[in-house]
Image (cartoon, helix red, strand yellow):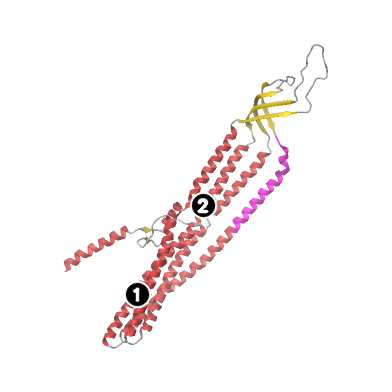
């Protein structure tokens, strides 16, 4: 017999180890990473990048020669004529209907940096859009926290409910012996049995809640999470109070975009220099005294400058300055509200730590009372209702500790999310 036991124990240990190793484990960090990979909005990263690349490529083509093809047909009330007649010389009269079809190449020589600034603005816009996307995706961590710790809380409650079921079952076994001996009424056993069934129903409810949480968590991370999945309880943390949220980077990127817009205003006020080549066919041609269709070409350099830009330059800069101040106000408001949340979380952390400091003492006392009640129940000193009261009191004390532990953890990790200091 002893030899058989010695053989069975190592075998059971091996089986349990294999089952533990084969169990699917998930950490909170794993859930964060998987959620960011699986969430549909993540695809916008590539779309934003491609949009910026295509736009910049189009802007870059502004350095290439630009071809314009134009045509016009006109009829005018009078034409140029020589008001003299010379003997033997026929001076042609121009037609009042005139035609022109030509193509023109323009090549930028100097644009004051306009194309360069357009590219810079597009890059700044891409950076703002990408950072806004990161801010939106960051909100996933709050939702993952609620689901992950929700599962942990339900798991702990199921374990505690199993302990209560064991206590009630033990009490029922004791009272059954008393009923057989005629020292207790059958109704006493029925009371315990009814409570036992109620607690088993509670287990069913808790298991249903767990499935709801795990189903939602599975959708977020793109992975099946079921009753075999073990969620690893994270260790307590001491979050830093320094704010490192993606919103702050978003405000910085918007500030850089305003800098680029300000430089664009300067560029708009500068003159532009282009080379051009125009060729076509017209009537009249370059020889305006000829009344026939003729080909022609013109080449040269063009200078363009519009002083009218100065009409609005000052106000445009003032608008950018207002937008910058508005951005500063938004940033200050965000930091204020975030720090306010952190302060509230600090108070909650201290509260749960103080509650946990006395939870074990309360549980110890309630456990002693319950154990005494079990003996008294067996000896017929107390009723089953009295015994159940003591069992429920101990259960409530343990449930409070479970709740306080999970509340402390979730507050600490929520504070990490609030400050942006996750590892």
Residue 185 placement (x, y as % from top left): 32, 87
Residue 144 placement (x, y as % from top left): 46, 59
| Numbered label attached to residue 165 | 1
Residue 354 placement (x, y as % from top left): 46, 71
Q: Quadrant of the N terminus?
A: bottom left
Residue drawn at point x = 61 percent, y = 56 percent: 330
Q: Is residue 306 magenta?
A: yes
The magenta-colored residue range is: 305-333
Judge whether residue 361 can be spotted in this image. Answer: no
- Does residue 63 appear left or right of residue 157 in this picture? right
Residue drawn at point x = 40 percent, y = 65 percent: 210
Callout 2 secondary element: helix
- Disc 2 designates what residue? 134
Nearest the eye: 307 or 86: 86
Judge whether residue 70 can be spotted in this image. Answer: yes
Mark before the other along the chain sequence, 2 or 1: 2
As drawn, 163 above or below 325:
below
Tag count: 2
Question: Based on the displayed image, in which of its 4 quarters is residue 195 positioned?
Answer: bottom left
């Amino acid at each position: 017999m002893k030899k058989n036991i010695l053989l069975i124990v190592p075998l059971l240990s091996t089986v349990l180890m294999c089952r533990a190793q084969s169990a699917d484990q998930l950490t909170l960090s794993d859930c964060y990473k998987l959620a960011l990979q699986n969430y549909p909005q993540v695809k916008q990263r590539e779309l934003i990048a491609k949009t910026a690349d295509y736009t910049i490529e189009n802007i870059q083509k502004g350095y290439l020669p630009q071809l314009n093809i134009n045509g016009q047909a006109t009829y005018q009330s009078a034409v140029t004529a020589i008001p003299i007649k010379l003997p033997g010389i026929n001076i042609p009269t121009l037609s009042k209907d005139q035609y022109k079809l030509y193509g023109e190449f323009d090549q930028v020589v100097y644009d004051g940096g306009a194309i360069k600034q357009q590219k810079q603005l597009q890059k700044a816009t891409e950076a703002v859009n990408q950072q806004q996307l990161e801010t939106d995706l960051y909100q996933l961590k709050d939702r993952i926290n609620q689901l992950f710790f929700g599962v942990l809380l339900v798991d702990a409650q199921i374990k505690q409910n199993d302990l209560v079921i064991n206590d009630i079952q033990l009490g029922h076994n004791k009272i059954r012996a008393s009923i057989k001996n005629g020292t207790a009424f059958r109704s006493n056993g029925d009371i315990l049995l009814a409570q036992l069934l109620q607690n088993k129903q509670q287990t069913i409810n808790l298991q249903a809640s767990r499935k709801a949480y795990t189903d939602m968590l599975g959708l977020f991370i793109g992975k099946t999470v079921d009753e075999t999945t073990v969620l690893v309880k994270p260790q307590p943390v001491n979050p830093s109070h320094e704010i490192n949220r993606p919103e702050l980077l978003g405000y910085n990127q918007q500030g850089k975009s305003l800098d680029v817009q300000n430089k664009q205003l300067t560029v708009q006020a500068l003159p532009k220099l282009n080379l051009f080549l125009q060729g076509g066919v017209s009537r009249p041609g370059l020889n305006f005294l000829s009344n026939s269709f003729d080909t022609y070409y013109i080449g040269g350099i063009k200078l363009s400058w519009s002083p009218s830009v100065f009409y609005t330059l000052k106000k445009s800069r003032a608008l950018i300055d207002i937008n910058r101040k508005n951005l500063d106000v938004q940033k200050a408001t965000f930091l204020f509200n975030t720090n306010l949340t952190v302060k509230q979380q600090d108070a909650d952390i201290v509260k749960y730590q103080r509650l946990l400091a006395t939870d074990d003492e309360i549980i110890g006392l309630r456990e002693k009372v319950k154990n005494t009640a079990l003996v008294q129940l067996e000896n017929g000193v107390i009723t089953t209702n009295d015994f159940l009261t003591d069992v429920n009191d101990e259960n409530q004390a343990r449930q409070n500790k479970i709740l306080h532990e999970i509340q402390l953890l979730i507050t600490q990790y929520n504070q990490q999310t609030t400050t942006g200091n996750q590892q």
